[in-house]
Amino acid sequence: MTTQTPTHEATPSALAAPLLARLDGLRDSVARLVEHRSADDPTAADPLRGLYLSQEAVRHLLRPAEPVRVPLPSAAGLPHDRLADLCARLGLTELDAAVLLIALAPDLDRTFEPLYGYLNDDVSRRRATVALALDLIGVPVHSAGARARFHPTAPPAGLGLLSVEEPERPFLSRSLRVPDRLVAHLLGDDTPDATLAGLLHPLTAPPEPYEDQEPGPDGEFTVFVRRLATLLTAGAPLTVYLRERREGDGLACVTAALRTAGVTALRFSGPEDRVPELLREARLGGHTVVVSGLPDQPAALTRALAAATDVPVLLAGPRPYDPHWCDQDPLVLDVPPQRAGALRTWSAALGGEPDFDLAATVAPYHLPGDRITRAAHAARSLAHFEGTPLSPAHLRLAARQQSASGLEQHARRIRPAVDWHDLVLPDRPLTQLRELALRARHRDRVLGDWRLSAGGGRGRGVLGLFAGESGTGKTLSAEVVAAELGLDLYVVQLSSVVDKYVGETEKNLERIFTEADRTDAVLLFDEADAVFGKRSEVKDSHDRYANMESAYLLQRLESFDGIALLTTNLRANIDEAFSRRLDLVVDFPFPDSGQRLALWRHGLSHVPCVEDVQLGSVAADFELAGGSIRSAVVTAAYLAAGRDDLVTSADLLEGARREYRKAGRLVPGEGTW
């Protein structure tokens, strides 16, 4: 809920002492007013006073009223006077403070109820009224200035500290009530309002403030944080909208600025009808309001928050600011990227530098500060469960769990369980795959710090094309790259993307790209020819709409910030405009006999085989790609399992023959080894 916990040396009883002292003085003032009124009241001794009007009472009421001034108590000189502090912070007058004290008295001391009933001349009216408050303060009831302080939009009613009830009654007879939360606060209770339960969330503080740091690798971010902290320290009410490039960046910036400024905050996520209670809570504690993740229709919420000109409000979200959200525009700022600060947060959350390269391990992840803390806690819990020291694998698994994604609506998630040893490829494609992982790891430094981005609103995504015949290892390579980066692999289901209705395919793709932009994952478009194919000459409406899809994809890829891999069996089918936007094109050649032998051996590495199994002949005689070799090994394994025996050369031969028959190819050496 707050960036830091305020410390109070005073105990709750000490915090309540000034308020109780004021009440003691108020009781004396009420007693003097009762004495003054009863001195010449003919009905003072009537036990039924207040229930009816006698002729003597009427004649007494018709006499001109004599003003009386009863001095109200003060708690001056007493430390920890929360009422005085609140009035000073909110700019309330002495009259406002006196009205609040008079209104809350029955909530703290029941003896005020019958006294107020007597002074109201109605035993059932046991709360202070406007007239009684003005009488106790000694202000004429016809004073326009005093009456204006009870207006719903004027302090303290406009600040949510006072309610003037029973609007159907004459103005002077309306009852005054203060919220229970105000009474609790004045007594020293800082528990948030019960109506805000579940709507306030903690803010995870960064490892250290940014006020004395050198700019360093995150210079732009650090300078931005300092400027925002200066605004917050100035104490001037302001509303700021921080547009974040990636979800969580705005909240990380806000958290760092709040800590640097030494300001506490309430992080809110709830409907606009809870804003009055939120603002009152912020006023009572002198907090800043933080809202991260605006609703789909944020106008009502932002208007309600921006209307509070006395409470600083910080909003953060990925969408561009819309002037329709507020009547008075907030200060709109773009949040710069941060990386070194995130590394410090990881280190602090882990309790220090681990034994492995932390920077290389967490480089692929872009988690906000609160999720970094949760991921670090989860990683330590995993290591404790396994009884082993903390490792990069624990950290990567925990980070993937925190990178929530809605991609599974349109893509199939694969948790990588492979590594580089599972790839049997020539040196050139292997080198390119490692370079692809390298680009994904260092793209922020190269494209951001070193300013090698092409500009024009282009993103910092990494795009690669895997081209080669079916079964040559394209999908497996994508899984290996994802495993190297410690990310999940999402295979886009083209059946859920391509739609026969005009414009729907683009909408589906936009949902995927938007979700992938905010998710730490690798996106795989398998058989990408279906959506990344060549544009054609427009001969009819079908061609025109097909070209529109390609044009959309060309534009969207340029602004993409994630990692996307495309696979195709026919590289020539990919539009040249797409190829130009790719970072790497990896060609997967058909394996030669030596590579086929390595693939057979790799496929049988965990399969029980006879000692004299012959792999050289089957690898040389059957020209199969890696995927087909795996299928042949699976067939051979089933044949052996059915006999409850080891895999033999005959089993492997039969598996290879079946792959040839499935492809409609002539089986070499049919019936011989």
Image (cartoon, rainbow, N blue to C red):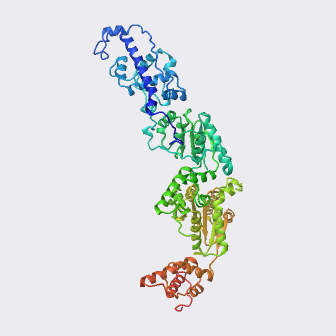
Along the line of sight, the residue nearer the viewer: 393 or 90? 393
Count of numbered labels shown in the rendering: 0
- From this view, report whether residue 66 is shown above or below residue 338: above
Along the line of sight, the residue nearer the viewer: 508 or 320? 320
Percent x, y for residue 613? Answer: 52, 87
Percent x, y for residue 211? Answer: 64, 42
Along the line of sight, the residue nearer the viewer: 243 or 488? 488
- From this view, report whether residue 184 is shown above or below residue 555: above
Percent x, y for residue 212? Answer: 65, 43
Along the line of sight, the residue nearer the viewer: 273 or 646? 646
Residue in view at x 47 percent, y 29 percent: 161
**Quadrant position of the C terminus in the picture:** bottom right
Residue in view at x 54 percent, y 34 percent: 308
Q: Can residue 321 be seen in this snapshot? A: no
Q: Can residue 112 be seen in this snapshot? A: yes
Instruction: Name the image quarter holding residue 197.
Output: top left
Percent x, y for residue 135? Answer: 44, 16
